[in-house]
C-alpha cells in the first residue's frame, strides 16, 4: 500500500511518499520540502496573510500532483502551530479544500508531540535493537513550537508542547544582523521562562536516549559534522541522512559562532540552507537551553519526524490483524482514558459502554459504511460521555461536550476531537439540530457521523443502564428496514430493556430502521 503525508509547518511544507508493507513497516520512497514560511508574521499577528495562503495552496497542489503520479492510495494532510493559532484557520482550510481537494487536519500541540515521538521511537529504536523498549526522550524544534516526547517503544509516557519556535522567536526578538547582545539575552530569558513548567513536569522522569528531530536540529548536526570532518562530502548529499551525535558543549560553541556572524555568512556554512540561516540562531538557542534545563549532555539526530509519525499512527489500524478483539484497547484511546481519569469518570461504565458501542458498530457495518477509525472516535466518545458529571449531573451531556472541546485529547486531531465531543453530547436528550452551535460548526460529513455514531452510543449506554455490566454480549439481525436486537445476559436486564426502548429513537432516525428488542 502506497501512502503520503503532507506536513504544513510554520517554516516549511513537507511531503513524504512511503510504501506500507503488509506487516506495517513504513518504507519512505520520496521526500520533498518547500520553505513557504507560512508562519512569517502569522505567529506574531495571529493571521495567515493572503500571500502566505497563495504560496501554501500552490505548494500543496504541486505535492498532490507529485503524490498522485507515484500512485499513492491516500494522502494525509496535517497542520501545526501557524494554522492552529491563526484567526482565519477555518477559512484557510476551506480554501485549500476548494482549490486542491485536500482536507487539512489541524493537530493540537500534544498530539503533534505524540506523533513525532512515535516516529522517533520507531526509527531510533532500530539503531539499538537490544534495548528497543528503553525510554527515549525526543526534542523537536519547529517554527512555531517545540515538542518534548518521552516514549517507551511507541507509547507516550509524557508529552509537552511549548510555544517557542525558531520562526516565532526570530521574528519577535532578532532585528539586527548579526543579532545584538541585548536581543540574544531577551530571547534566552524568554526560552528559559517557557521551559520552567515543562521541566517541573518532567522532574524525576528517566530516559536512556535523547534524540532530536526537525530541520533545525538536523541542520545543526550536519553543520557540526562538516566542521569536525571538513573533507567528508556525504553530508546532505541526498538519500537517507546519517544520524549524528552532538554534545551540549559542542552546541554551545557552535551557537556562539553563528550568533557572531551575519546571515549571509551562515548561508555559506555546509549543512545550513539559505532559508535556515535566518532562523538557526533562535533554533540553536532553544536546543541549547532545553538540553541545559533537562541536564542533557548528548543528543543524536533522527531523520524521522511528524510526516512519518502520522503515517505509522494512521495506518496501524489498516495493517493490524483483521480479527482484533473488540475489547482490546486501541492505542489511540490512551488519551481518552487519561482525560476520563482527570475528571474522575466511572471507568467500568465507560469501558463497558465503549465495548458495547464497538460491538454494535461491527455488527451493523452494512448500515453505516464508516471507516475503522470512526470506530475509534465512537469508543473515545463512549469512554468520555459521562465526564460532564464532574461539573453537574444536570445537563451533564452538555458539560461533557464542553470538557472534551476544551481539554487536550492526545490521539486525535482538533477536528476529530470536535466530532467526539458532539457524539458524547448526544448520548441523551435532544437530537442534533442546526441551531446547536457546536454541531452546526461541523462539516456535513462529520454531522452525518455524529448522527450515526451518536445513535449507536445511545443504544450502548442504554445497554448498561444499571452500570453493572449485565449485558455481556448481544446479536443484531438486519432484515430489510428492521433491526432485531437480542441481549445475552445471565441476569435480569429490566432496566436495560426499558432504557433501550426509550433511547432507540436516534438510532432509528439515523439509519432509517425500526429496532425490535427480542
Image (tube, rainbow, N blue to C red):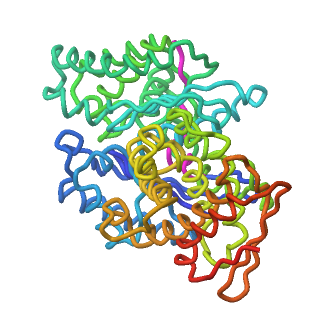
Is residue 116 in sight in this rendering?
A: yes
Picture coordinates of residue 341 (x, y %)? Answer: 56, 34
Picture coordinates of residue 138 (x, y %)? Answer: 53, 29
414 vs 487: above or below:
above
490 vs 240: above or below:
below
Side of 138 relative to 43 (left or right): right
Instruction: Specify the segment rendered in magenta.
Output: 297-311
Picture coordinates of residue 126 (x, y %)? Answer: 70, 35
Q: Is residue 151 magenta?
A: no
Side of 412 relative to 79 (left or right): right
Residue found at x 56% / y 12%: 204
Is residue 14 in sight in this rendering?
A: no
Question: Splitting the image into 4 quarters, where does residue 147 fall?
Answer: top left
Picture coordinates of residue 217 (x, y %)? Answer: 44, 30
Q: Nearer the viewer, residue 28 or 160?
A: 160
Residue found at x 26% / y 45%: 39
Amino acid at each position: 500500500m502506497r501512502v503520503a503525508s503532507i506536513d504544513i509547518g510554520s517554516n516549511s511544507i513537507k511531503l513524504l511518499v512511503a510504501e506500507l508493507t503488509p506487516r506495517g513497516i513504513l518504507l519512505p520512497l520520496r521526500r520533498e520540502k518547500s520553505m513557504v514560511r507560512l508562519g512569517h508574521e502569522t505567529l506574531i499577528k495571529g493571521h495567515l496573510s493572503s500571500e502566505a495562503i497563495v504560496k501554501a495552496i500552490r505548494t500543496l497542489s504541486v505535492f498532490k500532483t507529485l503524490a498522485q503520479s507515484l500512485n499513492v492510495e491516500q494522502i494525509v494532510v496535517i497542520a501545526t502551530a501557524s494554522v492552529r493559532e491563526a484567526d482565519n484557520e477555518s477559512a484557510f482550510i476551506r480554501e485549500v479544500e476548494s482549490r486542491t481537494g485536500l482536507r487539512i487536519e489541524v493537530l493540537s500541540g500534544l498530539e503533534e508531540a505524540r506523533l513525532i515521538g512515535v516516529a522517533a521511537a520507531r526509527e531510533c529504536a532500530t539503531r539499538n535493537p537490544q534495548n528497543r523498549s528503553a525510554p527515549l526522550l525526543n526534542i523537536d524544534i519547529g517554527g512555531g513550537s517545540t515538542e518534548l516526547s518521552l516514549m517507551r517503544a511507541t507509547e507516550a509516557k509524557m508529552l509537552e508542547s511549548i510555544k517557542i519556535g525558531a520562526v516565532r522567536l526570530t521574528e519577535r526578538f532578532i532585528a539586527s544582523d548579526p543579532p545584538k547582545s541585548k536581543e540574544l539575552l531577551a530571547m534566552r530569558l524568554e526560552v528559559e521562562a517557557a521551559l520552567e513548567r515543562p521541566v517541573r513536569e518532567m522532574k524525576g522522569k528517566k530516559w536512556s536516549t535523547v534524540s532530536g528531530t526537525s530541520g533545525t536540529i538536523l541542520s545543526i548536526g550536519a553543520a557540526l559534522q562538516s566542521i569536525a570532518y571538513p573533507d567528508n562530502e556525504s553530508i546532505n548529499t541526498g538519500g537517507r541522512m546519517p544520524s549524528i551525535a552532538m554534545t551540549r558543549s559542542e552546541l554551545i560553541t557552535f551557537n556562539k559562532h553563528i550568533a557572531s556572524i551575519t546571515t549571509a555568512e551562515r548561508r555559506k556554512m555546509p549543512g545550513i540552507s539559505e532559508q535556515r540561516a535566518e532562523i538557526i540562531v533562535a533554533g540553536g538557542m532553544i536546543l541549547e537551553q532545553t538540553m541545559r534545563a533537562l541536564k542533557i549532555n548528548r543528543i543524536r539526530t533522527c531523520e524521522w519526524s511528524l510526516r512519518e509519525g502520522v503515517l505509522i499512527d494512521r495506518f496501524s489500524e489498516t495493517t493490524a490483524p483483521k480479527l482484533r478483539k473488540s475489547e482490546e484497547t486501541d492505542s489511540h484511546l490512551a488519551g481518552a482514558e487519561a482525560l476520563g481519569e482527570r475528571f474522575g469518570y466511572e471507568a467500568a461504565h465507560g469501558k463497558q459502554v465503549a465495548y458495547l458501542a464497538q460491538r454494535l458498530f461491527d455488527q451493523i457495518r452494512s448500515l453505516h459504511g464508516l471507516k475503522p477509525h470512526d470506530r475509534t472516535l465512537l469508543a473515545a466518545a463512549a469512554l468520555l460521555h459521562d465526564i460532564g458529571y464532574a461539573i453537574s449531573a444536570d445537563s451533564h451531556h452538555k458539560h461533557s461536550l464542553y470538557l472534551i472541546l476544551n481539554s487536550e485529547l492526545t490521539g486525535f486531531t482538533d477536528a476529530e476531537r470536535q466530532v467526539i465531543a458532539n457524539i458524547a453530547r448526544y448520548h441523551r436528550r435532544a437530537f442534533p439540530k442546526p441551531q446547536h452551535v457546536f454541531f452546526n460548526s461541523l462539516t456535513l460529513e462529520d454531522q452525518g457521523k455524529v448522527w450515526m455514531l451518536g445513535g449507536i452510543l445511545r443504544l450502548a449506554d442504554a445497554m448498561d443502564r444499571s452500570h453493572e455490566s449485565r449485558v455481556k454480549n448481544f446479536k443484531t439481525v438486519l432484515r430489510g428496514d428492521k433491526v432485531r436486537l437480542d441481549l445475552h445476559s445471565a441476569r435480569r436486564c429490566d432496566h436495560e430493556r426499558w432504557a433501550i426502548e426509550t433511547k432507540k429513537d436516534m438510532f432509528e432516525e439515523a439509519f432509517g430502521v425500526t429496532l425490535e428488542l427480542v
